[in-house]
Image (cartoon, grey):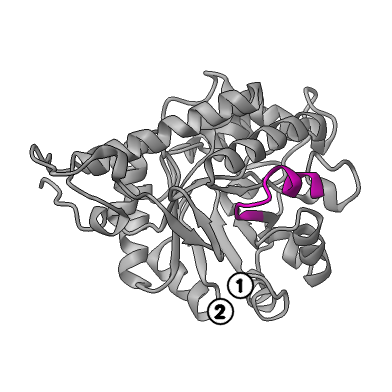
Amino acid sequence: MNDGDDIVTPAATGIDARKSDHLDIVLSPRLSARQAQSGFDAIVFEHQALPELDLAEIDLSTRFLGRSLAAPLLISSMTGGPARSARINAHLAEAAQALKIALAVGSQRIALEGRGQGGLDRSLRARAPDVAILANIGAAQLVMGYGRDEARRAVDMIEADALIVHLNPLQEAVQAGGDRNWRGVLSAIGGLVRDLGVPIVVKEVGAGISAATARRLAEAGVGIVDVAGAGGTSWAAVEAERASDAATRETALVFADWGIPTATAIRTVRAACPDIGLIGSGGIRTGLDAAKAIRLGADLAGQAAAGLASADHSAEAATAHFAAVIEQLRIACFCTGSRDLSALRHAPLIG
């Protein structure tokens, strides 16, 4: 779950409290029921009744950002106020290390502005020394004073392997006081690609990346995109819950189901950019969804909101949650006769 910066309301008086408020909303049943579907329900694998495989020997391993992963899974960006975020980040780092899967942190704006680390310091790398860790800044900040120095600080403070630049134009548009001037963002991203010295990952936060946008990013030198499509957390719906007046809430709710379904985004981006690194996130609720994302063309599947409750509880709970996702992915491989991820990418579909 990776959000931009948002409006002050009576319930939250600072950016740290506002981030924690986002977590409360996502964890509660308060979000609008009218949200987009990911498209994964329409993807059906052809069952293989004679897999001729040993389930225990199925190989889910892959490489990402120069590191070996035991499964093609990214714990996607989550955030919160500094105290709460520190606990969540510690739990996620320990789970990532235990399972040898990748970890992306939420927005580091609070830490960069010196208003609390939220666990976003070198203790994160100490907890997860062997896995890929991704830092995170907002694209809107790149045209509001942030540049290479801030991006480098974001990477260095957690010894990250790459930097995510997150795109959230819809969220910014529906919140009072949002960052609405997005002129020059693509050029700024291109500048980071040239100057930062670590891979740049560009991701949406829940409305998806189109094939055309992915091509523009690839032309700017971006090597990895995370489509973060519709079907997961709707940040328009989240902002509607936080709105301080009826008009703002009504406008935000109009866009609660806006976006490109994740399944569609993965398929079309892979077709348009066959060589780009591709992360599929947005509505990945189970290991079966992750298997479908891989089948459609993703290199990794990213999950955030579905794992949030466990991450808020303990490292053990977070580890158990993501271990279950991996086991579900393994069973999907078994029942499609796929001995590894390469085979899964060619597993027959029905329809």
Residue at numbered disc 1: 186
Residue 220, disc: 2
Give the side of residue 150 with respect to residue 244, left or right: right
Residue at position x 55%, y 20% in the image: 30
**Is 130 drawn above or below residue 47 in the view shown?**
below
Give the side of residue 97 with respect to residue 157, left or right: left
Residue at position x 64%, y 44% in the image: 3
Residue 137 image point, x, y percent: 71, 56
Residue at position x 79%, y 50% in the image: 109
Specify few, some or many for label 1: CA neighbours under 10 Å numbering under 14, 14-19, or 20 or more: some
Q: Is residue 107 magenta?
A: no
Q: Cβ–Cβ below 8 Å for labels 1 and 2?
A: yes
Q: Is residue 130 magenta?
A: yes
Q: Which of marks 2 and 1 precedes in the sequence?
A: 1
Residue 144 image point, x, y percent: 79, 63
Res. 179 image quadrant: bottom right
Specify few, some or many for label 2: CA neighbours under 10 Å numbering under 14, 14-19, or 20 or more: some
Residue range highlighted in magenta:
121-134
Under mark 2, the amino acid is Ala
Res. 313 image quadrant: top right
Under mark 1, the amino acid is Leu
